[in-house]
Image (cartoon, rainbow, N blue to C red):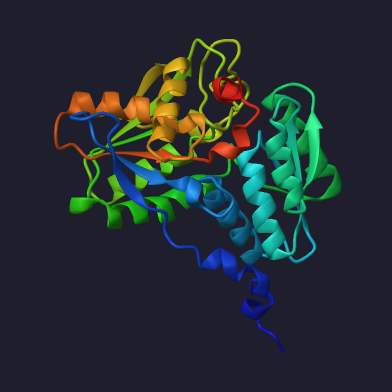
Amino acid sequence: MKNRTQNNAFPEGSRYLHQIAPTPLVPVSLQEGGAEIWCKLEYLNPSGSTKDRIARHIIEKAWRAGKIKRGSTVVEASSGSTSIAFALACSQMGLRFIAFIPESATSERELIIRAYGGIVRRVPGEMPEVLQAAKASSESEGWFLGQQFENADNTEAHRLFTGSEILSQIPGGCVDAVVSGVGTGGSLRGLYEAFSGAGCDVGAHAAIPIEGELFGTNVECCSLRFSSNVPGVADGISEIYATWDCGKLREWEIHDEECLALTHQLWAKGFPVGPSSGLNMAAAIQVADELGEGSAVVTVFPDRMERYFSHKIFADLLK
């Protein structure tokens, strides 16, 4: 008779998910004599973003707990990157995946999700409407909902895995500041908890894009309060960030045209990143300048450029 551990064993096809090497942590300076930032190259994850971390962790925990099994349906509300990550993980685990995304999400993202076998349902409106549609469908059909904006496993994935990797990679084994844009808040909160839990006297710094139209409706990438063209999560979308009581948290407002400019500079140095990397880099440079020479400032390059080919960040190259 098979025991419970054997019944909940992961399928053979999922071994790929368990043999992924840690993503590199590299020092990056955009100009001679400028601040040097330690950047975690999360775009080198299998689906091309840091969201692979949370998709894998959420699905594996649900599988071990018996909440899903081969053939189960997983759904998630996502403007793109998380749905792509779930689509890849579900294809490996023998699961059916349905992505609920805003009508405004780029076509590249939908194509990638569908290429992994995922089903895409576009929802009129912004993320609140997308979240409502995903939740209603999961409840009526009995599907498993990832709930990235409130699932504590999102934060846990970065605390257990991304943070541990960085601590083993950074010279001296300690971090002075962690910088990230905030969508779900999982990266920033998880990394801060990993570093502070390891004894680092670390500050948490949220990068907030403001004023322009660069980020459109990519709420997962980086969002709290922006111009009317960039919806935020402070009004209750992200429970992970809204419920975080962190005494060492600061917010840095970055004009989104600066995000665009720094993203182009990163491309020129060979980093194939999306605009959230430019945002993170801009804020990280300000933090490093304030902390002074020798400070260990860490940020994340969250995703790859190809899911933004129809985004305005490529406008100059398309002329």
Q: Quadrant of the C terminus?
A: top right
Q: Is residue 232 left or right of residue 165?
A: right
Q: Is residue 166 above or below residue 214?
A: below
Quarter of the rendering containing residue 313: top right
From the image, which quarter does the N terminus lie in? bottom right
**Could you say where residue 147 lies in the image, as x and y percent from the top left?**
64, 42
User: Toward the viewer: 153 or 257?
Assistant: 257
Residue at the location (80% across, 63% down)?
71
Q: Considering only vertical position in the picture, is 52 above or below 150? A: below
> Is residue 243 visible in the rendered structure shown here?
no
Q: Nearer the viewer, residue 215 or 266?
A: 266
Q: Residue at x 27, y 27 (%)?
A: 287
Q: Is 265 placed left or right of 306 in the picture?
A: left
Tally the numbered discs.
0
Relative depth, front residue between 268 and 274: 268
Q: Residue at x 30, y 49 (%)?
A: 197
Q: Where in the figure is residue 161, as x and y percent of width and height?
A: 42, 56
User: Would you place residue 12 above or below residue 274 in this image?
Assistant: below
Q: Residue 314 in the image: state x and y as whole percent.
A: 57, 25
Q: Residue at left 61%, top 24%? A: 318
Q: Is residue 35 above or below residue 303?
A: above
**Closest to the observer: 177 or 241?**
177
Is residue 207 visible from the viewing direction of this image? Answer: yes
The image quarter containing residue 61 is: bottom right
Q: Residue furthest right?
A: 141
Give the residue at the far bottom of this rendering. Answer: 1
State left or right for residue 38 relative to residue 273: left
Say whether residue 128 is left or right of residue 312.
Answer: right
Outermost residue on the front side: it is 319
